[in-house]
């Protein structure tokens, strides 16, 4: 019988695979012995990451890229020997548009996360009324909030920059990342830098300007691939990182098409007992749970307070509609990376990425690839429609906004049910309570992933790595 400690990583998305990778690496480097199993409910690894190749197009059905300035994923790519496969956005696709009163307007240059860092383009934009610009300028003199409690992203931005900047610019850009409502999202959990900038610099605009300048200097320490681009992806698609991880994880046991239904302490109090969906039992000395919060809650039903807290993290379902065209059918020049749609425009789509322009490797010559999003908190119309109806509604919006009437070469709808965690006000305190409770009841069970400290792919890699290092330390004690 193998007496080495057994660690089970539950969930084979980017968080789980990163956790397995860094656990294996740490064990090898410190000479600790350990067996690792990754248990995945679906029939494939990668979780939300899913790349499709069709007719010469590279199509992302889930995430399509990641932030270059957050180093965890670039570092992982480098360790896996994949850095040369990274690619940045097309430098000729820097413009982003926003739909306002039915027309596409260019976002003023210099916006960082929706906050102006260049004064002249902001003062000249037709997106905002003169009163809204004057209100935003008040940020330069308004005092900072002294209370340290969390508040919603919407209230924070409205307080600093006014309601029009929030609804016209910041909301579609920022809430788009979470498909959420800014008034329901925690500022400390979603954009912690806003809270700390206010505390440090008082003015959000001045603080963001300073960060931008320093960010420029910091970027010199980033690897070549991550400089001079906001986003990165892999030329052959994001699944490159998934395959790279799977290849590196030799000696790791992978089980797919078999979720874990229950996780509890072993009867003798030593280690953990995991009940698989097929009824088999796995015994483990340590567990890293990397599931959506609601799925983790089901597993932890025996640990009631934590399960109840986990169920309070809401999720929004979104759909991703890919449309491939002949380039000649584009009625306007694709001279940017696409556009976002504020709620008050009342459209069906929430954003449209001009994918083939933003990422030059994604379409064959002479073809265009568009990617539209549907669904956000408070708007689940698409869930009650057939696939044909969804595609028809998307095409109506493309006709109204971009004048496209041609029949697409093909379309692909990817429904991503309960896929976007909504970090509510007080989220960080809830996470702390969940982790403290688990540490008492099940000390070698760590819980992490997109439901906790960031939904972005680099955030997930970072969280997977941190959990791996923590578990290896706990197993050593
Ligand atoms: P998941 O990928 O959800 O993996 C969890 C895994 O657990 C799944 O494989 C699931 O099948 C499995 N599982 C569930 N229950 C069980 C069980 N009981 N037992 C065993 N296994 C189980 N981020 C970016 O950085 N850039 C983007 O461009 C971007 N775009 C996005 C677009 C969309 C439409 C969505 C939905 C998200 C996007 N994100 C983006 C966010 C990012 O994709 C996710 O936050 C990230 O992929 C989550 O990884 P994860 O491993 O934590 O979770």
Image (cartoon, rainbow, N blue to C red):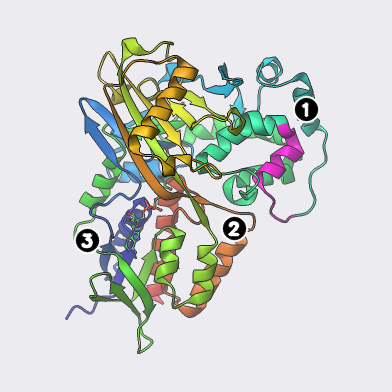
Q: Is residue 473 visible?
A: no
Helix, strand or loop status at disc 2: helix
Q: What residue would you read off at disc 1?
A: 137
Could you say which quadrant of the image residue 409 lies in? Answer: top left
Q: Position of residue 156 (x, y in %)?
A: 71, 43
- Say whether residue 197 is left or right of residue 234: right
Tell me the tag on residue 254: 3
Compare residues 116 and 400 and report the one nearer the observer. Answer: 400
The reply to whether the magenta stretch includes residue 155 is yes
Tell me the tag on residue 427: 2
The image shows residue 265, relative to residue 81, as above or below, that is: below
Q: Earlier in the sequence, mark 1 or mark 2?
A: 1
- Other residues around mark 3 within 10 Å, as few (<14) / some (14–19) / many (≥20): some
> How far is mark 3 from mark 1, CA to CA?
55 Å
Could you say which quadrant of the image residue 472 lies in? Answer: bottom left
Compare residues 91 and 27 and report the one nearer the observer. Answer: 91
Q: Residue at x 23, y 79 (%)?
A: 3
The reply to whether the magenta stretch includes residue 7 is no
Q: Which residues are magenta?
A: 148-163
The image shows residue 235, relative to residue 24, as above or below, that is: above
Q: Does the magenta stretch mainly form a helix, a strand or a loop?
A: helix
The image shows residue 440, relative to residue 376, as above or below, that is: below
């Amino acid at each position: 019988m193998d007496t080495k400690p057994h660690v089970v990583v539950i969930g084979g998305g980017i968080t789980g695979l990163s956790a397995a990778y860094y656990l294996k690496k740490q064990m090898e480097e410190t000479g600790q012995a350990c067996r690792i199993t990754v248990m995945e409910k679906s029939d494939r690894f990668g979780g939300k990451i899913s790349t499709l190749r069709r007719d010469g197009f590279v199509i992302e059905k889930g995430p399509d890229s990641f932030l270059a300035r957050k180093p965890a994923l670039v570092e992982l790519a480098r360790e896996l020997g994949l850095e040369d496969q990274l690619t940045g956005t097309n430098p000729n696709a820097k413009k982003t548009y926003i739909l306002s009163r039915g027309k596409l307007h260019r976002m003023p240059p210099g916006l960082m996360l929706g906050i102006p860092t260049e004064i002249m383009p902001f003062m000249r934009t037709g997106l905002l009324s003169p009163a809204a610009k004057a209100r935003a300028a008040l940020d330069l003199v308004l005092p900072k909030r002294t209370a340290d409690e969390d508040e919603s992203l919407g209230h924070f931005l409205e307080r600093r920059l006014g309601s029009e900047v929030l609804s016209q610019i910041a909301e579609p850009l920022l809430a788009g990342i979470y498909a959420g409502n800014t008034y329901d999202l925690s500022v400390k959990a979603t954009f912690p830098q806003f809270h700390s900038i206010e505390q440090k610099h008082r003015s959000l605009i001045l603080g963001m300007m300073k960060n931008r300048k320093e960010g420029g200097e910091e970027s010199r320490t980033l690897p070549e691939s991550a400089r001079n681009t906001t986003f990165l992806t892999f030329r052959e698609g994001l699944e490159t990182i998934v395959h790279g991880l799977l290849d590196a994880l030799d000696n790791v046991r992978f089980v797919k098409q078999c979720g874990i239904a229950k996780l509890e302490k072993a009867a003798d109090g030593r280690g953990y007992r995991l009940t698989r969906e097929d009824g088999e039992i796995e015994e483990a000395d340590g567990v890293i749970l990397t599931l959506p919060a609601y799925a983790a809650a089901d597993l932890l039903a025996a640990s009631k307070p934590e399960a109840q807290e986990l169920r309070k993290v809401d999720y929004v379902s979104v759909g991703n509609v890919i449309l491939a065209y002949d380039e000649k059918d584009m009625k306007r020049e694709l001279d940017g990376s696409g556009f976002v749609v504020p709620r008050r425009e009342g459209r069906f789509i929430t954003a449209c990425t001009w994918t083939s322009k933003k990422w030059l490797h994604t379409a064959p010559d002479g073809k265009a690839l568009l990617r539209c999003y549907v669904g956000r908190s408070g708007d689940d119309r698409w869930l009650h429609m057939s696939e044909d109806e969804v595609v028809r509604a998307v095409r109506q919006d493309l006709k109204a906004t971009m004048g496209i009437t041609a029949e697409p070469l093909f379309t692909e709808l990817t429904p991503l049910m309960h896929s976007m965690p909504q970090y509510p006000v007080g989220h960080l305190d809830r996470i702390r309570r969940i982790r403290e409770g688990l540490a008492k009841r099940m000390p070698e069970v760590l819980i992490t992933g997109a439901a906790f400290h960031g939904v972005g792919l680099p955030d997930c890699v970072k969280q997977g790595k941190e959990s791996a290092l923590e578990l290896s330390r706990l197993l050593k004690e």
